[in-house]
Image: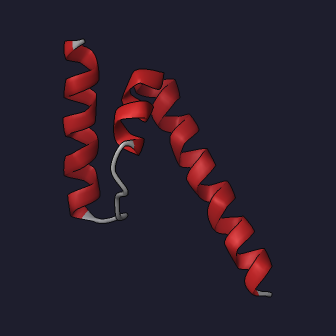
Amino acid sequence: MLYIRSEVQALLQCKKLLKIADKHGWDTVRKYNEHPLADNDIDAAKLCSAIARANWL
């Protein structure tokens, strides 16, 4: 059961990254993945920062 739960979490993370890439591009995903992030308000702030950095390049 633990294995299935970890696989579901991995698929959800992959889906999240694909949504970010679709909307903001793969450069943003690369910046987003540079640091481990939590799914909370801090995560949202870091994503906005990653989007800004990717658009700056």
Decide which of 45, 27 is in the foreground and name it.
Answer: 27
Question: In the image, what residue occupies the spot 79% across and 76% down?
Answer: 4
Q: Is residue 43 above or below residue 7?
A: above
Asked whether residue 25 appears in the rendered view, the answer is no
Residue 56 spot, x, y in % from top left: 19, 14
Decide which of 32, 40 is in the foreground and name it.
Answer: 32
Question: In the image, what residue occupies the spot 61% across and 47% down?
Answer: 14
Q: For residue 34, what is the image quadrant? A: top left
Q: Is residue 46 above or below residue 11?
A: above
Numbered disc total = 0
Left or right: 42 in relation to 4: left
Question: In the image, what residue occupies the spot 29% across and 65% down?
Answer: 40
Q: Quadrant of the C terminus?
A: top left
Q: Is residue 25 above or below residue 4?
A: above
The way the protein has been coloured in the rendering is secondary structure
Residue sitting at the far bottom: 1
Left or right: 2 in relation to 43: right
Residue sitting at the far front: 34
Q: For residue 18, what is the image quadrant? A: top right
Residue 5 spot, x, y in % from top left: 71, 77
Q: Is residue 25 above or below residue 30?
A: above
Q: Quadrant of the N terminus?
A: bottom right
Asked whether residue 7 appears in the rendered view, the answer is yes
Residue 46 spot, x, y in % from top left: 23, 47
Left or right: 51 in relation to 34: left
